[in-house]
Amino acid sequence: MKWKANQEARISLSGFAMYLFAVPWTLFSLMWTGFAAAGVGSTEIDGAAGVLAWAFPLFGVPFVLIGFRLLAAPFLPLWERGKVLYAVTNQRVLKLRLGRTLNTTSTPLSRIAKIERVESKDGSGSLKLSIGSHKDSDGDIVTDHFAIGPVPDAFGAQRLITQLTEPDAALI
């Protein structure tokens, strides 16, 4: 293993842009479910019709859960602290994510065509590696990417990957 780094647990301010959609979604789904439950709860329905009447408020529950998931999204890096490891070997770039199971994603160095780096003042950042392309259902060409980061030393990872993929090239 030539390089490795754990994913940083940083909250990105850009993740909160999703709140422009997530807050109205969640409020509307809570209101919908609440009004539907209040409507069913205020009427007296007996037997099978009473059970069926609760189907309408229960229909809103998945939408409420999606809203809560959208609101929690910017904080997920804190939840994944210490669970994501990136590594570069002589032949591959790896992402290992430990949750209930170990998820491994890798790509051979020979597939890397382009590297884009976004770096903060402290040297931390992320890399987006172009690893190929495919055609989507409309016939448009879509570039496939492998993402690394955010990690503490994005430049070090880029320098090593460039050295391994293009031994003759000097990194500027």
Image: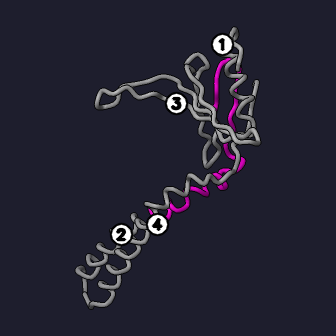
Mark closest to the chain's N terminus, 3 or 2: 2
Please state, as top left, top right, bottom left or bottom right, where the C terminus lies in the image. top right
In the image, residue 20 above or below residue 85: below
Q: Residue beneath label 2, please?
A: 60
In terms of secondary structure, where does tag 2 sit?
loop
Check residue 79 for magenta coloring: yes
Mark closest to the chain's N terminus, 3 or 1: 3
Distance from the alpha carbon under mark 4 to that under mark 3:
30 Å
Q: Give the amino acid type for the residue marked by disc 2 in the picture.
A: Gly
Q: Residue beneath label 1, please?
A: 166
Mark closest to the chain's N terminus, 4 or 1: 4
Question: Picture coordinates of residue 152 (x, y %)?
Answer: 74, 40
Left-right relation of 32 to 106: left
Mark closest to the chain's N terminus, 1 or 2: 2
Distance from the alpha carbon under mark 4 to that under mark 1:
47 Å
| Magenta residues, start to end | 66-95
Mark closest to the chain's N terminus, 4 or 3: 4
Distance from the alpha carbon under mark 1 to that under mark 2:
54 Å
Distance from the alpha carbon under mark 3 to that under mark 1:
19 Å
Q: Are marks 4 and 1 in contact (CB under 8 Å)?
A: no
Q: Give the amino acid type for the residue marked by disc 4 in the picture.
A: Val
In terms of secondary structure, where does tag 1 sit?
loop
Q: Residue beneath label 4, please?
A: 23
Mark closest to the chain's N terminus, 2 or 4: 4
Q: Which mark is residue 145?
A: 3
Identify which residue, 137 or 56, lies in the foreground.
137
At x 34%, y 81%, the residue is 35
Q: Residue furthest left?
A: 49
At x 25%, y 84%, the residue is 47
